[in-house]
Amino acid sequence: MNSLFDSIRKLGFRRGPDRILGGIAGGLAEVTGINVWLMRLLVLASFLLPVIGLGAYLVVWVLTPWQDNSIPLQQLFGGRSIE
């Protein structure tokens, strides 16, 4: 499972430093070049989609590395391999 986390880190996507809650919208704004407030509105609008919006946000939240490369799901398992 550690190879999964290493692969996620290699993508280069990180939670944005300009964050309010989880930093997902800030990270997406940084990658796409869109204004962070517009991205936040788009993320909030996605929550109107039944299950998909909030569910996708939660999945991305547990798998997206912080600025220091730590991943919440990996921390949940103590950073050890869970294979």
Image (spheres, helix red, strand yellow):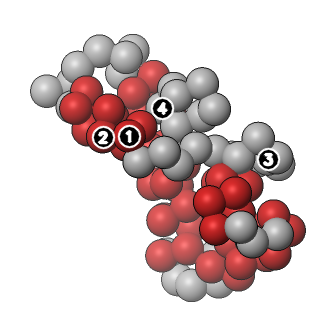
- Whether residues under marks 2 and 4 lie with C-beta atoms below 8 angstroms apart, the answer is no
Q: Nearer the viewer, residue 50 or 31?
A: 31
How far apart are labels 4 and 1 at the CA level?
12 Å
**Identity, as a three-letter code, of the amino acid under mark 2:** Ser
- Whether residues under marks 4 and 1 lie with C-beta atoms below 8 angstroms apart, the answer is no
Which label sits in the foreground, 1 or 3?
1
How far apart are labels 1 and 2 at the CA level?
5 Å
**Identity, as a three-letter code, of the amino acid under mark 1:** Lys
- Whether residues under marks 1 and 3 lie with C-beta atoms below 8 angstroms apart, the answer is no
Q: What residue is drawn where x is 64% and y is 45%?
A: 15
Horizontal arrangement in the rendering, residue 30 relative to residue 19 (left or right) = left
Looking at the image, tell me whether mark 4 or mark 3 is earlier in sequence order: 3
Q: Position of residue 38 (x, y in %)?
A: 81, 75
Q: Is residue 38 above or below residue 74?
A: below
Q: What residue is drawn where x is 52% and y is 49%?
A: 13
Q: Is residue 65 above or below residue 74?
A: below
**Identity, as a three-letter code, of the amino acid under mark 4:** Ile
- Residue hosting label 1: 10
- Residue hosting label 3: 19
**Identity, as a three-letter code, of the amino acid under mark 3:** Arg
- Residue hosting label 2: 7
